[in-house]
Amino acid sequence: MKFLTDPTLGKLAKWLRILGYDTAYYRGNIDRNFLKKAEKEGRIVLTRKRDMENRSFSGQMVIIQDDRVQDQMRDVIRKLSLTPDPDRTFTICLRCNEALKRISRDEIGEIVPGYVLRNHKDFKICPRCKGIFWPGTHRDNMLGELNEMLR
Ligand SMILES: [Zn+2]
């Protein structure tokens, strides 16, 4: 399942990426190209604009009504009967929406501080922004928040 969110749903897009869903975040004005992109790429549209329902669109769409991202997530999960796969969490770059690739400690070299290299072995890299990611406190905090959300 792939998604396209409108420009007001950046946080929701981030959380869907954390769960491992390919989620494009639309930056431009919400015009015909917004729905065209979703149709072309087979993405489910997530939008706060209620009048979108009246436009001609062959794909699937969820109108988001909640303001808090926690409620938005619950709503999307319920309406689309999503069953997030725990193995897919943190497999996508939160910034670029690119699938992360495994990278060995040797390949990382000096990009990452020494103490991190010594204490972790599971590293991933984003092919686009070249960001390096590893399981850490930040990730544990996000998982905690996520569990709250999904409860
Ligand atoms: Zn990236």
Image: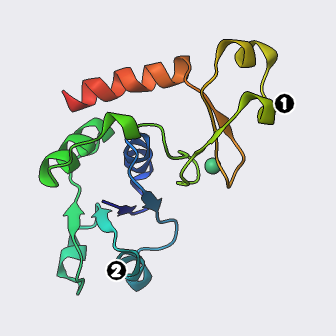
**Other-residue count near label 1 (Cα within 10 Å), few / some / many at <14 / 14–19 / ≥20:** few
Q: Which residue is drawn at 28% across and 25% down?
A: 147
Residue under label 2: 39
145 w.r.t. 88: above or below: above
Of 112 and 102, the residue lying toward us: 102
Of 61 and 86, the residue lying toward us: 86
Of 22 and 4, the residue lying toward us: 22
Q: Residue at x 50, y 25 (%)?
A: 139
Q: Considering the image in quadrants, where does the C terminus appear?
A: top left
Q: Locate residue 119: give its quadrant.
A: top right
13 w.r.t. 112: above or below: below
> Looking at the picture, how far across and down is residue 146, in whole percent?
33, 29
Query: Hey, what amino acid is under mark 2?
Result: Glu
Q: Considering the image in quadrants, where does the N terminus appear?
A: bottom left
Task: Name the secondary structure under disc 2.
Answer: helix
> Looking at the picture, how far across and down is residue 138, in whole percent?
53, 22
Query: Hey, what amino acid is under mark 1?
Result: Gly
Residue under label 1: 109
> Looking at the picture, how far across and down is residue 66, in whole percent?
22, 47
Residue furthest to the right in view is 110
Q: Residue at x 42, y 78 (%)?
A: 37
